[in-house]
Image: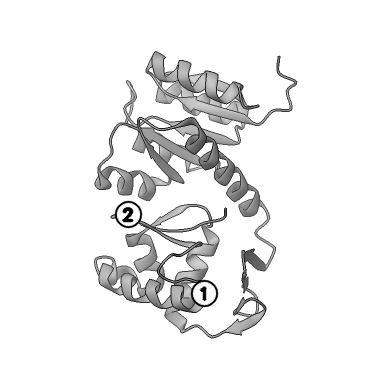
Amino acid sequence: MTTGLEPLVLLVEDEPPMRRFLRAALTGHGYQLVEAETGAAGLTEAATRTPEVILLDLGLPDMDGLEFTRRVREWTRTPVIVISARGQEKDKVAALDAGADDYLTKPFGVEELLARIRVARRHRDEVAGTDEPVFTVGDIRVDLSSRQVFVQDRETRLTPTEWRLLTTLVRHAGKVVTHRQLLKEAWGPGSVSQTQYLRVYMGQLRHKLEAEPARPRHLMTEPGVGYRLKLE
């Protein structure tokens, strides 16, 4: 029995077995679930129910999930987690570029899904409070107003490019940021194919911010897709 206070998740998925699996998993862990079998129905539910997180299959009967994501992004920042059998890097990049916050390839485990939902909800709350100028994760503190970075309360100097990369990751903390988006933010639209720049500068950031740069805890690589500033 629900109380109406449980976090609301919208599932946009046309496969009955997957809906049954997710219904059991989510309601069993304290979530309310609203289901939609088409993109059109999902857009209506998203507009009328104001869910905290949207779980989205890309292969919908009436529209592609990328189109759904682009349309929902016209009016809401509600986190969108794609759940899809399409596991190729190009599919993940396309979904993230369209505005999705995260991507899970079927099949996946319940615990991983629940962890991704927790991160998405936390990111949503942080976006809602973007007036806060100081961002903290682990031993790293980023003061956006004074343009300072501290590691274990000691200031760490960053180059202008490193600062632009870090602040882009901070603005999207918990979310995968694609190579293209990071390159555009740090070097401009003409450099979106220069992924070798990213490897060099992300390596430099890790050496300045991570206790063990070779085994980062916060600046995570999403192979073939981009990078994520991990909140957990």
Residue 71's spot in the image, x, y percent?
A: 43, 38
Neighbour tally class for label 1: few under 14, some 14-19, many 20 plus, Cα within 10 Å: many
Residue appearing at x 62%, y 84% in the figure: 155
**Amino acid type shown at disc 2:** Val
In the picture, the disc for residue 155 is: none
**Amino acid type shown at disc 1:** Leu
User: Tags 2 and 1 in contact by the CB under 8 Å rule?
Assistant: no
Residue beneath label 1, please? Answer: 209
Residue closer to the observer: 152 or 70:
152
Residue 24's spot in the image, x, y percent?
A: 54, 18
In the picture, the disc for residue 225 is: 2
Residue 56's spot in the image, x, y percent?
A: 43, 31
Residue 208's spot in the image, x, y percent?
A: 49, 79
Identify the secondary structure beneath mark 1: helix
Identify the secondary structure beneath mark 2: loop
Residue closer to the observer: 228 or 109:
109
Q: Earlier in the sequence, mark 2 or mark 1?
A: 1
Snapshot quadrant of residue 228: bottom left
Tell me the quadrant of the picture where the N terminus can be found.
top right
* Rendered view: 134 above or below 174: below
Residue appearing at x 59%, y 42% in the figure: 118
Please give left or right for residue 16 compared with residue 135 in the image. Answer: left
Please give left or right for residue 123 compared with residue 207 in the image. Answer: right
Query: According to the image, what is the colour scheme of the structure?
Result: one colour
* Numbered-mark total: 2
Neighbour tally class for label 2: few under 14, some 14-19, many 20 plus, Cα within 10 Å: many
* Rendered view: 179 above or below 24: below
Q: How much space separates mark 2 and mark 1, taking CA atoms?
A: 22 Å
Residue appearing at x 69%, y 62% in the figure: 131
Single out the mark in the foreground, 2 or 1. 1
